[in-house]
Image (cartoon, rainbow, N blue to C red):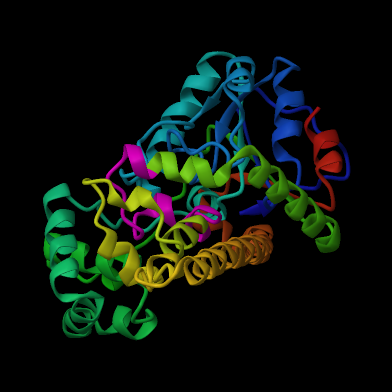
């Protein structure tokens, strides 16, 4: 892979593909709208949270009005209880890039899911998707015997993955076992096979822009955006999701930053939403712990003691809310930290042997702000 110079702002060719990669809350969406208005671009979302329907506030999803004016591919494509693999994402992007070029547009891939970008630019191991029947079988096993039983089994069939993974990493452990049961080949063996990257297409010109703003500035932006989410009703949104869908705390959608913290809060205050017949309250308690509401204790006490108990319950709920907000802020900052790490890796992809990438050129440019990246793309 060759690193193209970005000392002169290029005129993007018609066969260009642009990746705008930046951490959460950095202003990517506003720039995407501006670029869309130039008439040159179509927008493709690279966000593993925006794929879910009805998850709007906590994902900072563009509003219905904004999506009508600025259409995004790969937004609102599945329900929260469904899964969507990286391989499916890459396949969808390959199709959409061709569609954009056929429409005379340049595809602008914008979002903050760095693993998706790495799959596009560096390649994806040929690990097969899990079949639905296998996925159900492994999930039933996990629910019946617990994740430790699956982890122990993984140690027998895939020692490399067993050593690499933590015993509580439910998502990766179940995925590894699904792959082994389906193919009789360890996922670690699949991952050692040669990668294939979409960006290696010799008929396309890929431009990867990494934006790494000042962290103190970004942390203020994150805090401001979370404040907006609380005011707009993130807690009520999660309650609505639980009322609508048969969700569990280990589903990928419910592990999204913000949503997981709200789920923990709702479990800790023993919210009535868990009375829904399609929800298994015990699953949430197993993950987040049980909570005894003080107002429901000491029923036989006099009115004064019952009033004190009710006050204690209110104070406990207020404390749980405060902890939820602090945990969400910390988790979002940690997400941004991981995104910076991914961005540095992506910026170094030019060091890969170009012979492995069909000798095609990929322009990789780094910026301190979204505004600077915008100058490159106008």
- Give the left or right position of residue 359, taking residue 76 as reference: right
Q: Position of residue 72 (x, y in %)?
A: 55, 26
Is residue 123 in view from this perspective? yes
Is residue 364 in view from this perspective? no
Magenta part of the chain: 242-261
- Give the left or right position of residue 354, taking residue 129 as reference: right
Could you say which is closer to the camera, residue 85 or residue 83?
Answer: 83
Could you say which is closer to the camera, residue 360 or residue 369?
Answer: 369
Q: Position of residue 83 (x, y in %)?
A: 32, 46
- Give the left or right position of residue 296, taking residue 142 as reference: right
Among the 4 quarters of the image, the one containing residue 77? top left
Q: Position of residue 168 (x, y in %)?
A: 36, 77
Q: Position of residue 310 (x, y in %)?
A: 51, 64
Residue in view at x 86 percent, y 42 percent: 372
Residue in view at x 51 percent, y 39 percent: 50
- Give the left or right position of residue 14, taking residue 153 as reference: right
Q: Is 356 one of the magenta-colored residues? A: no
């Amino acid at each position: 892979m060759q690193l193209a110079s970005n000392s002169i702002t290029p005129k993007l060719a018609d066969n260009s593909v642009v990746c705008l990669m930046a951490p959460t809350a950095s202003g990517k969406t506003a720039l995407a709208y501006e670029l869309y208005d130039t008439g040159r671009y179509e927008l493709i979302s690279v966000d593993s949270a925006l794929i879910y329907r009805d998850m709007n506030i906590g994902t900072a999803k563009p509003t219905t009005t904004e999506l009508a004016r600025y259409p995004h591919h790969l937004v609102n494509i599945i329900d929260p209880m469904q899964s969507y693999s990286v391989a499916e994402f890459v396949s969808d992007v390959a199709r959409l890039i061709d569609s954009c070029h056929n429409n005379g547009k340049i595809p602008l891939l914008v979002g903050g899911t760095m693993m998706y970008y790495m799959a596009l630019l560096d390649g994806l191991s040929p690990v097969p998707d899990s079949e639905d029947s296998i996925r159900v079988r492994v999930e039933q096993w996990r629910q019946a015997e617990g994740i430790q039983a699956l982890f122990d089994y993984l140690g027998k069939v895939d020692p490399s993955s067993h050593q690499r993974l933590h015993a509580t990493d439910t998502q990766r452990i179940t995925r590894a076992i699904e792959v082994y049961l389906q193919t009789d080949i360890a996922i670690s063996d699949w991952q050692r096979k040669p990668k294939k990257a979409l960006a290696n297409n010799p008929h396309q010109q890929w431009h990867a822009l990494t934006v790494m703003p000042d962290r103190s500035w970004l942390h203020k932006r994150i805090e401001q955006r979370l404040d907006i989410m609380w005011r707009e009703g993130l807690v009520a949104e999660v309650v609505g999701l639980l009322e609508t869908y048969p969700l569990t705390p280990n589903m990928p959608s419910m592990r999204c930053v913000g949503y997981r913290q709200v789920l923990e809060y709702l479990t800790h205050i023993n919210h009535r939403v868990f009375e829904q017949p399609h929800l298994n309250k015990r699953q949430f308690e197993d993950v987040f712990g049980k909570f005894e509401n003080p107002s429901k204790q000491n029923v036989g006490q006099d009115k004064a003691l019952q009033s004190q108990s009710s006050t204690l319950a209110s104070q406990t709920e207020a404390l749980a809310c405060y902890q939820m907000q602090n945990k969400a802020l910390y988790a979002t900052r940690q997400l941004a930290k991981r995104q910076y790490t991914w961005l540095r890796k992506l910026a170094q992809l030019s060091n890969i042997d170009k012979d492995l990438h069909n000798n095609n050129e990929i322009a990789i440019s780094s910026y301190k702000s979204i505004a600077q990246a915008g100058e490159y793309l106008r």
